[in-house]
Image: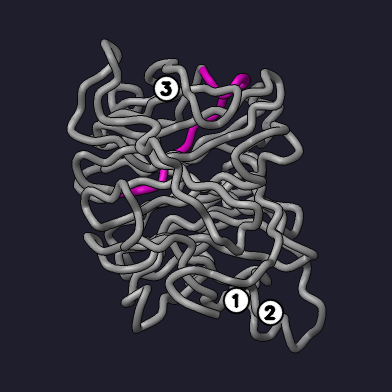
Amino acid sequence: MSDPILDRRTILRAAAGTAVALPALSSPAAAAAAGPAGFPSYAYLGRSLNTSALRYNPTGELIFPCVRGTYDRMPGGLGRYYLYYAPHDAPGGICLAYGDSLAGPFTEYHANPIVSRQWGSHFNVSHVSSPHVLWHAASRRWYLYFHGENSTTRLATSANGVDFSYHGVVLNTSMVPGISEASYARVFDHAIPARGARYVMVFMGNHGGNRKIFWGWSGDAVSWQFAPNPLISPAGDGLTDLSGPHLLKRNGTTYVVYHGNSGKMYLTEVGNSFDREVHLGVFHTPLTGGPDSRRSAAPAFGTDGGVSYMFYEAGQRGSTVIAVARATS
């Protein structure tokens, strides 16, 4: 495996905004080596982008990967797969790369950022970041959720995944009591009939000086209701702050994997109705050396041939890159 660009031609079918159901383990020996709840362990493969060659890289850091397959939804795209990412610090900017394999190589879109910190009369903020794209099957459009400022999560939509039209604010701190941030949101197809929900959102909220995971639900992925209390609190993992949540499904139930201030990723079962908080411990431990340098965050998942892959943000804040790991158990 070369670094910084992956050269394996592994085709990975990414989950387009759907909580990923990871494959069952194949043997007792594999199960013994697996993570909590029987989830696989992951081994680093390489970086997804050559940061030194990017035309748009204003802060030398990349965060919050989101990879989506286009080939079965949008013929004639730039590539079979789109990789969305962003710098974290100002000016930020929602960026796009594309390729014909999720193993790479990815080509930077020539007109990045596709969303900048100023958008006509809609907003003018210090930065925009944390892109998450959902394939909205009912409208056959791509829904892009992103934050800017940290108190606000916004929505834009697109027919081609490149040119977006601004919709508006879908979440801000006024909608959830007691929080001062509302960012790093991801949205998934997930039905909760009792709430009339077809979609759920998980996001980070600063609550009482600590960052916790909150959630909301929607029938259309546009208009949202939000639970007033945290879905997951850091104390259950012996931590002070959590961020970057992502849904996973397994064992007939639903989990959230997320980054903790220790640098590791953790797993909590929330149940299919989001009415549980069962902390299950460490999901993934970062590499001591590069590119992780003891920190891995903002995971996103896909599978190929029954094997799970994890894209993630690797490294200490200020020098992060987008990395990919493959299940080993």
Task: Name the residue that disc number 3 marks.
Answer: 170
Give the quadrant of the C terminus. Answer: bottom right
Q: Position of residue 68 (x, y in %)?
A: 61, 44
Q: Is residue 207 above or below residue 102?
A: above
Assess disc 3: are there few (<14), some (14-19) or many (≥20) residues with their C-alpha within 10 Å of its C-alpha: some
Query: In terms of sequence position, does the residue under pointer 3 or pointer 1 come before the other?
Result: 1
Between marks 3 and 2, how big is the CA–CA gap? 38 Å
The residue depicted at 39 percent of the width and 26 percent of the height is 154
Q: Which tag, 2 or 1, sits closer to the chain's start?
A: 1
Crowd tier of the residue under label 1, counting other residues whose Cα lies within 10 Å: few below 14, some 14–19, many 20 or above: many
Q: Secondary structure at mark 1?
A: loop
How packed is label 2: few (under 14 Cα within 10 Å), some, or many (20 or more)?
Answer: many
Query: What's the residue at 21%, 47% (across, down)?
Result: 89
Give residue 329's mark.
2
At x 26% / y 30%, what residue is drawn? 117
* Residue marked by disc 1: 41
* Residue 8 in view here: yes
Q: Which residues are magenta?
A: 211-222
**Location of residue 320 by image quarter:** bottom left
Identify the residue at horizontal 28%, vertical 14% (top origin): 120
Tag 2: amino acid: Ser
Q: Could you give the CA–CA distance between mark 3 and mark 1, rounded to whole angstroms?
A: 35 Å
Q: Is residue 17 left or right of residue 72?
A: left
291 horizontally vs 173: left or right: right
Quadrant assignment, res 18: top right
Q: Tell me the CA gap for discs 2 and 1.
A: 6 Å
Q: Position of residue 222 (x, y in %)?
A: 52, 19
